[in-house]
Image: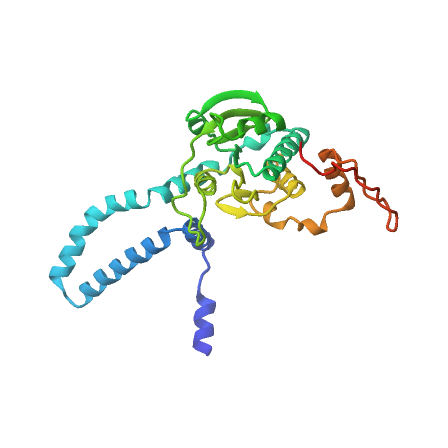
Amino acid sequence: MERILGGLSSLEINPIAIVDIALTALLIYWLFSLIRGTRAVRLVIGVISLYAVYAAAQVFGLQLLSQILQTGAVVGLLALVVVFQPELRRALERIGRVGSLAWLWSGSHHEVEHIAAEIARAVALLSAERVGALIVLERETGLQDAAESGVMLHADLSTDLLRTIFTPRTALHDGAVLVRGGQIVAAGVMLPLAETTIHAERLGTRHRAALGITEQTDAVVVVVSEESGSIALVERARIVRNLDEERLRAALVALLRPGGTRGRAVFTLPPPGERSLRARRRQRRREGSPRDIAAAPGRPMATPAPDAGKQG
């Protein structure tokens, strides 16, 4: 024990070595977080298995097998670039966002509130009518290439325009709408389908497209299911389902506001049953319902009109 303690006391701690180890650990953690939940995990396991076979062949002196694996490794380096192309693209995209100063010229809080309210209202109406919708909100990563695949509009964002675009049997209702700031940049946009994200459940084309664009960029996507009318929010290839108007508006404000919370804001929203009385009253007022909610417990509620609650 004395020898061990004496040996430890004689070690010189090099600060540069500590920094080197810490940065290497962060790099390994970042690489694992990049491929977590994707098909690349199995590919990495396959590569490690081949390397283990090569190491065993070297130890046991299997010259022929070692020569074959060495020859295949030359071609394998080029093959890895092709196989891991989606992951490499995502990695370079994330590196390009490090140190970005886009938040300096992002919209004001008032503009973000307006964008979130207009989109949440339009999505709520489309959901009630069982009309499918796909709305992509651009953040720091530019989506001009995707916008040019659709019809350029450059129109002011509004609830009525969104509902008109997604009206069934119109020319642009099948594609996505791209929103940049307070403008609808393009409609009928074609998005890449999900490539790397693993989901056990069956997903429709709109949800796969939402996953695809959020795998490659930092965009926020709102999806309305045509079959069930449910509202989902997709961010960084993660889906939050069964949102209502108020929760969707709050999530969009948290994700779009200048210097706002990224990533986790969507997953920490309170459930619908915990919304305040003021929020429920504001939602009914926006819906145009003549019914009002009692301000205090025990106060009788007004009888709704015969047509109350119907969507126009």
* Relative vertical location of residue 99 with respect to residue 240 in this rendering, above or below: above
- Where residue 180 appears, as percent x and y from the top left, is 54, 28
Measuring 20% from the left and 46% from the top, which residue is drawn there?
75
| Quadrant showing the C terminus | top right
User: Does any portion of residue 158 appear in the rendered image?
Assistant: no
Q: Nearer the viewer, residue 100 or 164?
A: 164
Q: Horizontal placement of 66 versus 98: left or right?
A: left
Residue 303 at x, y = what percent? 82, 42
In the image, what residue occupies the spot 28% across and 42% down? 82
Q: Residue at position x 48%, y 21% from top?
A: 152
For the rendered model, the colour scheme is rainbow
Compare residues 274 and 161 and report the one nearer the observer.
161
Q: Is residue 210 left or right of residue 46?
A: right
Q: Residue furthest bottom?
A: 1
Tell me: 151 left or right of 83. Answer: right
Outermost residue on the front side: it is 306
Q: Is residue 12 visible?
A: yes
Q: Position of residue 31 (x, y in %)?
A: 41, 50
- Tally of marks: 0
> How far across and how far down the image is residue 285, in percent?
76, 35
Q: Does residue 130 lie above or below 48 as drawn?
A: above
Q: Residue at x 72, y 34 (%)?
A: 286
